[in-house]
Image (cartoon, grey):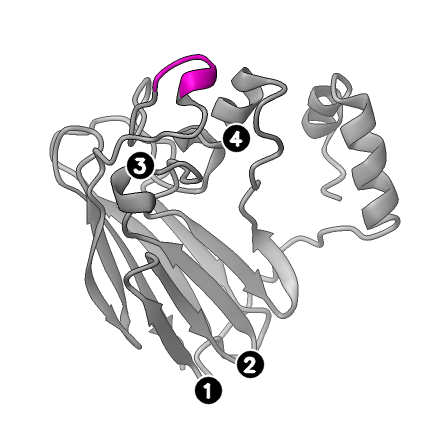
Amino acid sequence: MFDRKDFKDFSESFTIDRKVIAHMVKDFKVEPGVDQSRSRWIFEVDFDQLKEVPFIKTEFLSGGGNLLDRLEGFSYPEFGLYIYKSTQLYLAIRCGSNGQNGNGGHAHNDQLSIELTINGKDIIKDPGTYLYTPLPEKRNLFRSTKSHFTPQCPGKEQNSWVEGLNGLFHLKNEAQAKCLHFSEQGFIGVHYGFGFPFIAKLHSIRIE
């Protein structure tokens, strides 16, 4: 999909997975983004104690139109999901409880992660679960912090789990994620999974 050699080299070890995906996407290719735009969304991280993160600020550009046209917001606080939708944009933010009264049996370390689609093209997509019990290490990899588009703290997980089969359907609710603000202007959320308040902001800018 991305026509990148590093992705190709990595996927060689997952032959069956690669063939299935190749059959599904066929000739579809992800095109490079267009620089010219009238609006953009910015993902920023505020931190005092964290000194190294893979990304601090990321900008998502529209493809020449306005991402804010007919923008609507949908919040599901009990589920921990916040969504922005417009004629060109789908943006989902994960921020809330681990579920199952704190057991988190199906939860991932995806607090403050996002999914993004612009003009019908997936820009950022959650990797999903992959599988459950056959390969515990893969189950844990796909629910780990590093597998999601969310601020990273090297060597740390948002929430910890018990290793082995007994821990595959339990995720401690150490992050205690909470939405602080949700409106047409943007989103602010916080979690405590790294041992201190970790705040992420998403906001839009209209370029006239």
Above or below, 167 relative to 30: above
In three-dimensional space, the C-alpha distance between marks 4 and 1, rounded to whole angstroms, equals 34 Å
Q: Quadrant of residue 11?
A: top right
Residue corresponding to mark 4: 142
In three-dimensional space, the C-alpha distance between marks 4 and 3, rounded to whole angstroms, equals 18 Å
In three-dimensional space, the C-alpha distance between marks 2 and 4, rounded to whole angstroms, equals 31 Å
Secondary structure of residue under mark 1: loop
Can residue 98 be spotted in the picture? no
- The kind of residue on which mark 2 rests is Thr
- The kind of residue on which mark 3 rests is Asn
Instruction: Please state the horizontal and vertical placement of residue 194, each as a whole percent of the image.
Output: 21, 29
Could you tell whether 63 is left or right of 104 in the image?
right
Can residue 67 be spotted in the picture? yes
Residue corresponding to mark 3: 103
Q: Are marks 2 and 3 in contact (CB under 8 Å)?
A: no
In three-dimensional space, the C-alpha distance between marks 2 and 3, rounded to whole angstroms, equals 37 Å
Instruction: Please state the horizontal and vertical placement of residue 134, each as a whole percent of the image.
Output: 63, 20
Q: In what quadrant of the picture does the N terminus appear?
A: top right
Q: Quadrant of residue 104?
A: top left
Residue corresponding to mark 2: 87
Residue corresponding to mark 1: 70
At 56% from the left edge and 41% from the top edge, which residue is drawn?
128
Q: Which mark is residue 47?
A: none
Pick the front one: 103 or 179: 103
At 49% from the left edge and 79% from the top edge, which residue is drawn?
86
Above or below, 83 relative to 153: below
Q: Badge 4: few (under 14), some or many (20 or more) residues near its Cα, within 10 Å? A: many
Viewer-nearest of discs 1 and 3:
3
First reached walking from the N terminus: tag 4 or tag 3: 3
What's drawn in magenta, residue-wise? 162-166
First reached walking from the N terminus: tag 2 or tag 4: 2
At 65% from the left edge and 68% from the top edge, which residue is drawn?
120
